[in-house]
Image (cartoon, rainbow, N blue to C red):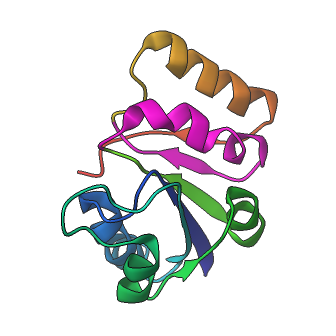
């Protein structure tokens, strides 16, 4: 089994709420989300804090992106509602050499997308983005 780490701006959002079960199911149990990091707690009224989200989904909260990278076999950078955060959130992961998936919308501009892929290429880090559908 390969461990997946989630990096998100905040975790209580549709993709983070559904990807753990979906990844486990479509991989036949070969992928499992084990670790999560969020920059902030949900800004939405009634949204879960990072701690509450991790407890609800049985995923270990980590204190830093560095810790998440160290513990994970592959990394999902989510933040589907705030794609302007992708470049910042994936900067360290893209230097790790571990596979990195960046959720859609990938980047706000072509220039940002080019910078993201340039960091991945320089570090020989596999990087991709696609719709989960």
**Residue at horizontal 30 percent and vertical 55 percent from the top:** 43
Please state the horizontal and vertical placement of residue 26, each as a whole percent of the image: 35, 71
Instruction: Give the answer, above or below, for where 37 lies relative to 113.
Output: below
**Residue at horizontal 39 percent and vertical 21 percent from the top:** 108
Residue 101 is covered by the magenta coloring: yes
In the image, the segment drawn in magenta is 81-104
Identity of the residue furthest to the left in this view = 45
Residue 106 is covered by the magenta coloring: no
Please state the horizontal and vertical placement of residue 32, each as a whole percent of the image: 51, 78
The part of the image, by quadrant, that contains residue 46 is bottom left
**Residue at horizontal 75 percent and vertical 58 percent from the top:** 66
* Viewer-side residue, 120 vs 108: 108
* Viewer-side residue, 8 vs 23: 8
Please state the horizontal and vertical placement of residue 103, each as a whole percent of the image: 40, 44
Instruction: Give the answer, above or below, for where 83 lies relative to 46.
Output: above
Instruction: Give the answer, above or below, for where 13 lies relative to 124.
Output: below
Give the total of numbered labels: 0
Please state the horizontal and vertical placement of residue 47, each as a whole percent of the image: 25, 67
- Please indicate whether residue 113 sits to the left or right of residue 49 in the image: right
Identity of the residue furthest to the top in this view = 111
* Viewer-side residue, 22 vs 9: 9
The part of the image, by quadrant, that contains residue 73 is bottom right
**Residue at horizontal 61 percent and vertical 81 percent from the top:** 1
């Amino acid at each position: 089994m390969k461990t997946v780490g989630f990096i998100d701006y905040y975790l209580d959002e549709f993709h983070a709420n559904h990807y753990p079960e979906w990844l486990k199911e479509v991989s036949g149990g070969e992928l499992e989300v084990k670790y999560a990091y969020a920059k902030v707690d949900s800004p939405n009224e009634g949204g879960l804090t990072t701690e509450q989200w991790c407890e609800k989904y049985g995923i270990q909260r980590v204190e830093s992106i560095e810790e998440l990278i160290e513990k994970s076999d592959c990394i999902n950078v989510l933040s589907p509602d705030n794609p302007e955060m992708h470049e910042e959130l994936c900067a360290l992961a893209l230097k790790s050499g571990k596979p990195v998936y960046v959720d859609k919308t990938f980047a706000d501009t072509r220039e940002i997308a080019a910078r993201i892929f340039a960091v991945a290429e320089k570090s020989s880090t596999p990087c991709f983005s696609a719709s989960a559908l």
